[in-house]
Image: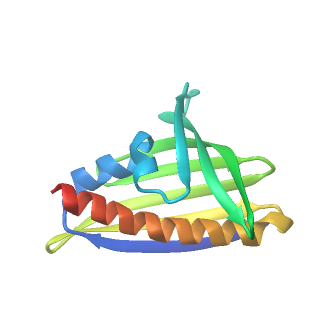
Amino acid sequence: MNQGIFEKEIFIKSDVKTVLAVVSEFNRHHQVHPLIVKVEPAEAPAGVLKRYFITDQLQWGPFKFKITYRADILKITDNSVHTEAYQSPGTYIDNQTSIQPVEGGVMLKERVVMKAPGLLFNYAFQQAQTAHEEMLKRIKTFIEASG
């Protein structure tokens, strides 16, 4: 099992409440996440606020394929969201997102810890980093265009 960490951040001309509403509602993530093609709400077990099954469209060379994984929202505070995702075989993503007010808007920050089996890790880690960088840009555009 390999592990890696990446952090991303972006300034958004908005307020904490608006940004928190977008990042904590996965039903809307197909609008901002570049890989997501389907989001299905599911019954959340004890200790989980919300659970979803999410389908991503991926590409490896000339091959396109879809994967489905479980995504749980574990905690939401006034300015943060803690999520966890799991996809078989043994790929875990822990995401701590925070939104801090700054002059003229907010700073949206993500800290992502990924664990995956050795053979899958490099591909999965690169896909996650690229997708999350694009997702933050799309969140910014989505929120600023709506405001």
**137 left or right, relative to 15:** right
Residue nearer the viewer, 67 or 45: 67
Which of the 4 image quadrants contains residue 127? bottom right
Q: Is residue 1 visible?
A: no
**Is residue 128 placed above or below 146 in the rendered structure?**
below
Residue 53 x, y percent position in the rendering:
59, 37
Q: What is the quadrant of residue 63 in the picture?
A: bottom right
Extreme top residue here? 43
Q: Residue at x 46, y 73 (%)?
A: 8
Residue drawn at point x = 15 percent, y = 57 percent = 147
- Total labels: the figure holds 0
Q: Is residue 21 left or right of residue 52?
A: left
The reply to whether residue 90 is in sight is yes
Outermost front residue:
62
Q: Residue at x 53, y 65 (%)?
A: 131
Which percent across, then down, holds residue 62? Answer: 74, 67
Q: Quadrant of the N terminus?
A: bottom right
Q: Position of residue 35 (x, y in %)?
A: 55, 57
Residue 108 vertical placement versus 32 (above, below)? below
x and y percent of residue 86 in the render?
67, 47
Return the residue nearer the eye: 9 or 48.
Answer: 9
Q: Going 55% across and 25% down the picture, which residue do you hit?
A: 43
Q: What color scheme is it?
A: rainbow
Does 2 sit left or right of 79 as displayed?
right
